[in-house]
Every structure is written in C-alpha cells, then in structure tokens.
Amino acid sequence: MYSSLRPLRRWFANKQIRNLSTKKDPILPRHSQASRTSYSPPPRPAQGTASKILAFVRYSPWSSSFPGSWKTRALVQSAIYAVGIVTATNYVDSLWFPKDTGYASPREIKVAIEKLKQAFPEEDRVSTNPDLLVEHGASENSYHPASPHAVVVACFVHPSSTEDVVTIVKIASECRMPMVVFSGGTSLEGHYSGVLPGSICIDISGMDKILEIHEEDSDLICQSGARWEDINMELEERGIPLFFPIDPGPGATIGGMIGTGCSGTNAVRYGTARAEWFLNLTVVLPNGEVIKTRRRARKSSAGFDTTKLFIGAEGTLGIVTEATLRLAPVLPTKVAMAQFKNVEQAVNAVQEVLNSPYGPHIQCVELLDDNMMEAINIAGSTTTKPLPIRDTLFFKIQGDDASIKLAAKSVQTIVKKHGSDKFEFASTDQEAENLWQNRKYALTSTMGAHPGTRCWTTDVCVPVSKLPELVKGTKKDLAESGLYGTIVGHVGDGNFHALILFHNEDELAKVADAVRRLVYRALALDGTCTGEHGVGIGKKEYLVEELGEGTVELMKTIKKAVDPMNLCNPTKLYPDTHKPR
C-alpha cells in the first residue's frame, strides 16, 4: 500500500517545486531590510464552492487526470466506497433499529423464531399469526400505547412446563429479544403490550393446573396460569372447606395477580397479594436460572423475603411458573345492602362500622354509586327485581348465625346514624350471590347499559378517612367535564374505581385528562396512583411523585442487577424520565 501511494506523493512534490520556481517577488520600495521583511503579499482571492468542486472532480480517482497509478486509483476508490457504504448502513440502522434499545435486528428476530420452532416443533406452539400477535399485545379495555409481538409461544401443561420457559428465556437472551408474559389478559394498564422492534410473548394461560393440595396445612401448589376462580371451584367440588381469598376481577390468573400485587373485594378482611397468601414462588430469572424463593413453611425469618421481591414487579424481574398459596377456612356469610342519599354519607359510615367490635366480621364492604346502580338495572342484572337507584353499600358479613345477627344489628345502627334509610339482607343464598355478581361484573354492566360507548377503567387508593373527599371531588370533576362514569369501590380499604365512558377520540382526550386529575387528587391526599390494577405503562409517569426519586432509583438498581439486558417486560413499571407535575 505504501509503494502504491509513492507516485501520488512524487507528483504533489514536483508540483510544489514548480510553483515555487515560477513565483516572482513583488516590487518593493527602496527602503531598509526591515521594510522587506515586514511586507506581506496581498491575499489571493478565495475560490468559490463551484471552483472547489471542479478542482476535486478534475483530480478525483474517477477522473482521467488523476495523477496516480491505476493501483492507487483503485485503492482510493475502494476506500471512498467503503466509507460511503458504512455511513449509509449506519444511517439506515439508526432509523430502523435504534441503537439505544440494544435489541435484536429483524434478521436476528427471524433467527430467534426459527430456533423457537425447532425447540417446540408441535403444531400451534410457535405462532406468527398477525391477529394472534395483536390479540396478545393489546387490550380493547386499555387505551395506553400498545404494539403487537413478533411471535407468540404457547406453554402447554406437562411436567416440563418450567423447563419450556427456561428454553424460551435462553433463546430470547441469546438473540436479545424482549419477553412479555401473557396469561389472563385482564390487565388494564398495558402490562402485556409488545415491545419494538419485536418481542416474544410467552403465553402461560395453558399452565393452569393445581399440582398439589395440602388440606392439613391449608395450602396448595399451582401453576401460574391457574385462575383464582377455578382454584376455589376445584376446592369446593372436592369438598375441601378452604378457599383462596384474594379475588380480583373475573378471569385473573395467579401469575398476573402476583405481578400486579392485586387485591379484591375481600381485602378489607384478608388483605392483598402483598400479605402472606403467597408462601413461595418458582421463578425463571432472565438468565434462565430457576429459583424457589423459600420453603413451604407458614413463616420464615431466613434471609430476605425474596417472594415479595416479585410481587408487584409486573414480570420485570423474572417469570413466575409456580406458586404455593395459603388457604383460608370457608365461613358462612350473609349479604346485606344499605342505601344513602349521597356517597359522602355512605363512605363516612364505613369506617365506623370497621372500627366497631363487630368490624372483624365484615368480610367485604363495597360502594356502588347511583350511576352504577342504574347501569345494573338497565344492563339486565342477575337480580330478580330492579334495585333502587341510590348510592349503595354492599356488606358481606361472615361468622356463625349468632355472630352474623349481632354484627348485622350493629351495622344497621351505624348506617342509620349516617343517613341510611334502607337496610336489608338478601332473602336467599341465590339472591346474595346475584347481588355480589353485579358488583364483580361492574365493567360489563356499565358498558352494557350504554351500547356504543367505550370505557376507561382506573383505580386509586387513599387513607379511608380521606375517601369521602376524594369521591366527592371526582364526581364533581366528571360532571363539570361533561363526562359520564360509574364509581365502585372497596371502600373498606380506601380503594375505588372510576369507570368513565366516552364515544370518540375527542372525548377520550377529556377522559385521559380527568384520570390524570384523579391521580394527582389521590396523591395530594397521601394516597397512591393505583390500589390494585398495577402500574404497567399507564401509571408509571406518577411513580416518582408518589415514591420519590430515591425509591425509584433503588427499584431500577435492582432491575439492572437481576436483568442487565432489560429483556423481561421492558417499558413497564419503571419511569423513563421524571417529568415535573
């Protein structure tokens, strides 16, 4: 290469010598030598852009006037071509495959899909069907940004289900593809949305078996795709007088319940998923390693409580494949209904009921506002008669007959003091079940009563004493914004849901603003942006304001330590950057 450049160097040297030999000194005045040395020739006129281009073209390696040999010409041309190709490739890559993600390119995604098909050759195990990719990457009841996945892998039930997840995780890690778990598909905050440029959706809805039941220890082991309703039904059918008391929305699975740290109507008596109802978890970590967070003993003080590390982590630290659930005894219950003139009276009555000597007998206490009661009637509820359209509390009282009678008498006295003029029990067990089903299917009733509308469902939670102020402010805000919504809530623990209806994109923008105001209203009352739905995509912008930058940075530090490649459900839970309110 050095010798091939020698003619070019010789040509430039000769040209410089010729220029120097033909250069004439300017006529100088007859003064001292100092005058001669201080003289500067006038500046040469600057060349224009066109002149420079012509000069380059004249002596470019593609010009016949190029002074070097053919080897030099070819070398320079090749170098220019190489620089151009690299520059163009980097530019296209920066547009199509942003480098800051560090994820797989389209070619690598195809390689990963082929590896998955080789690992799971059974029919329908690995799918790239566009409809299925969209279905597993977005929910019709969520209005947050969503993307389809690149591939869906279904995990069927057999003894090696955890090993199947390990295989998928190792392929994803090797090919740098994000992983998102799908089970019940009931999330409302975008938890299972796909990740660009392409993600693997691990569908564990088929991993739904109860593996072991230990009646004498009041616990069971199940796979993470099992639904809480199916678990309780199985226990009832086997004649086992136990149940799993965490009861979120219909269709929720154990894995999703762990991920969101959920609760439900029973939280006032039994607490949430963050209590001791999950004794241990089997988790596949982002590197493919399988861990079990602890043994099956009812309590333990050995080391960190790593079980709780994964509760509320929303699948960002690993994939839960099995869980040991603690069970509670089934107790007799009665359902009662109390109605009020307004929401404030209803909510104010709740805290006094719970603080009374018979408070421990209250298993559930739920609020349904007047709009919700109207929706139940219009939608064709399961009750045999229309319900009065007023703000209503539903109580579920548990215990033996004597305890229920004493607790009911106490509740009736308290609610009457707070303005209730109607208190009655469900006359039969079937009526009680129907009343409770109306509460559990509030979203279906709300949308069924108003055909053609869509519904944004959100939840917040505040200290119970602050709940009347929050509910009153929210109903006023919705009315002033021209929006219609229903309110239902687990008022025994300060948690309530707003189900806000809209018809078009303009109204959707108004709803989004109303939800934002609701969250900040709850935070101002020392509450939380979500009581049980989880953070996902929809609520992560509020996390710094709620928890503080230090706590959020600690969460991110744990995430980076466990998942340094950020492959487990990225873009969820952790705030991107803190935006001041």
Image (spheres, grey):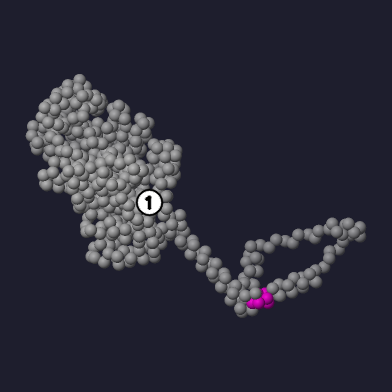
Q: Is residue 535 something that shows in the picture?
A: no
Vertically, is 39 above or below 425? Answer: below
According to the picture, the residue beneath numbered tag 1 turns out to be: 570
Q: Within the magenta stretch, is there residue 58? A: no
In which image quadrant can residue 567 be found? bottom left
Left or right, 12 with respect to 130, comes to: right
The image position of residue 44, as x and y in percent, is 74, 62
The image position of residue 265, as x and y in percent, is 22, 37
Q: Within the magenta stretch, is there residue 5? A: yes
**What residue lies at 42% left-to-right and 37% top-to-bottom?**
548
**What residue lies at 50% left-to-right and 64% top-to-bottom?**
88
Q: Amino acid at mark 1?
A: Pro
In which image quadrant can residue 465 be found? top left
Label 1: state its secondary structure. Answer: loop
Vertically, is 273 above or below 83? Answer: above
**What residue lies at 25% left-to-right and 57% top-to-bottom?**
161
Furthest residue toward bottom: 70
Left or right, 230 with respect to 111, comes to: left
Q: Quadrant of the N terminus?
A: bottom right
**What residue lies at 17% left-to-right and 43% top-to-bottom?**
216
Q: Is residue 73 something that shows in the picture?
A: yes
Q: Residues within 10 Å of mark 1 (few under 14, many from 20)?
A: many
Vertically, is 461 above or below 60? Answer: above
Left or right, 6 with respect to 310, comes to: right
Furthest residue toward top: 417
In which image quadrant can residue 350 be found? top left
Q: Main secondary structure of the magenta part?
A: helix
Q: Nearer the viewer, residue 147 or 510?
A: 147
Q: Which residues are magenta?
A: 3-8
Q: Quadrant of the C terminus?
A: top left
